[in-house]
Image (tube, grey):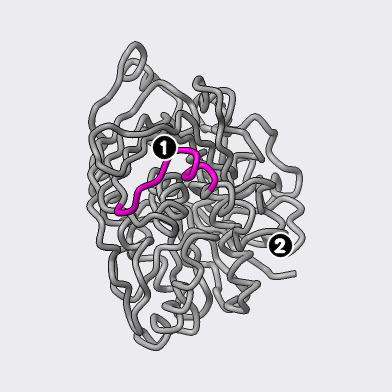
Amino acid sequence: MLKVALIGATGAVGQEFVIALNRHPWFELTQIASSPRSAGKKYIDALRDSDSGILRWHNKERVPNYVEDMIVSRVDDVNPQEFDLVFTALESDDAKLIEPTFARSVPVISTAAAFRYEKDVPILIPGINDNHVELLEVQRKNRGWRGFIAPLPNCTTTGLVITLKPIMQEFEIENVFMTSMQALSGAGRSPGVIALDIMDNVIPYIPKEEEKVQVETKKILGDLDSESIDSAPIKVSCTCTRVPVLDGHTETVFVGMRKPAEPAQVKEAMIKFSKAVSVQNFPSSPQDYIIVHDDPTRPQPRIDRETNDGMTTVVGRLRRDTVFEYGVKYVLLSHNERMGSARGAILLAELLRHKKMI
C-alpha cells in the first residue's frame, strides 16, 4: 500500500479525490492539506462555512467516514519524504509555487495547467500516450529531482484526444474543429447566485480554454523525441462555451483525415482501440474506454455522464462530414470531474505504479 498526500483537499476536485481514494486497494490517503483558513480543523469542519453553517460538499455521496475527522494540515507542514506520491488539486498560480517543492522528493500528479507546456513535462492521458511517461525521467535529470510533476490535460482536451487517437492511428488526421458545451462544475463550485449568469443562457467564452485545448491536443498526440515531444502535425481549432449542465462536457467534433474512411470504419477503429487499450484491469479502469452509440439522440449529459462511474468517453452521431474531402463528424461526452480530473489522475497513478515510476 502506497502512502499518498492530497494538496487542495477541500475544493471540488479535492473532494472527488477523497471519494475516489476511499478503500483504494493500492493507495492510502494519510494526509490532507489546504488553505490556512482550513488548517488545523477536522476535514468535516473545514468544509463547513463558519458564518452560514453550509456544508460545502458538492457530491451525492456523503463525506467518507475515513476522512471526516482527519486534520487538515498547512501545505508547509506536509513532509514529502513521508509519502510515496502526492496528488494536487490546486489553481495554477498556487501549483506553480507548491508542486516543485514536493517534486524534489516525490512524484506529483497534478490537475493544474502550471507545468503542462514546459519542454520536459508530458501531458498524460492513461491509455493514450503511455510512452510519453519516459519524459518524466528526462525531467528528473534536468531538474535534479527525485520525483517529477505529471499533469493531466484540461478536462475538455481529455475526451477530444481519447476519440481522436484511434482515428489518427488508422486514418491520419489533418484538421480538427471542435465546439464544446461545458458543464458548470468545470468552473468550480460555490454557494450563491452564480446561477443568475447561466440560467436561460449560454456563455460563449471561457478564458484561456481554447488555447489550452489547441496546444494540448497536439502535444498529447505528438511523438516523443529523446528529450521533448514533437507536436502532432495537425491543425486544431475550437470554440469553448459554458452551458447550464451540472457535470459532463459535450463536444461536437469535425475531423479531416488524410486517408478515406467511412463512418462505420471510424466506429470500428474506436471500438477496436477501446478493447485493446493499455489501461485495463487497474482498480480505476472503466469496463469500456470508449462507447459508440447508434442512437442519434445520444450522448446526453444527464443519461450518459455516469457511464462506468464517469470514466468512459461516450460517442454518438458519427457520420460523414461534407466539408472535408475525407471527413467525419461526431458528438462526444466526457465527465469533466471523473476521467477529466481526479479519477483520471488516480488512473494515471495506477499506470505509473504499473510502470514502476512510483
Residue 264 is a magenta residue: yes
Mark 1 or mark 2: whose residue is earlier in sequence: 2
Q: How far apart are marks 1 and 2 (CA)?
A: 27 Å
Q: Is residue 63 left or right of residue 312?
A: right
Residue 314, x across and y down, in percent? 54, 37
Span shown in magenta: 258-268
Residue ID for mark 1: 186
Residue 85, x across and y down, in percent? 58, 70
Q: In this view, does 325 lie above or below 193?
A: below
Bin the neighbour count of mark 1 within 10 Å (Cα to Cα): few under 14, some 14-19, many 20 and up: many
Q: Is residue 18 left or right of residue 169?
A: right
Bin the neighbour count of mark 2 within 10 Å (Cα to Cα): few under 14, some 14-19, many 20 and up: some
- The residue closer to the viewer here, 42 or 123, is 123
Q: Which amino acid does label 1 sit on?
A: Gly
Q: Is residue 280 visible?
A: yes
Q: Which amino acid does label 2 sit on?
A: Glu
Q: Which mark is residue 4?
A: none
Q: Is residue 40 visible?
A: no
Q: In which quarter of the image is the C terminus?
A: bottom right
Residue ID for mark 2: 28
Q: Is residue 149 left or right of residue 294?
A: left
Looking at the image, which residue is at 23% across and 40% down?
A: 207
From the image, state whether disc 1 or disc 2 is nearer to you: 1
Looking at the image, which residue is at 39% across and 43% down?
A: 156
Looking at the image, which residue is at 36% across and 38% down?
A: 328
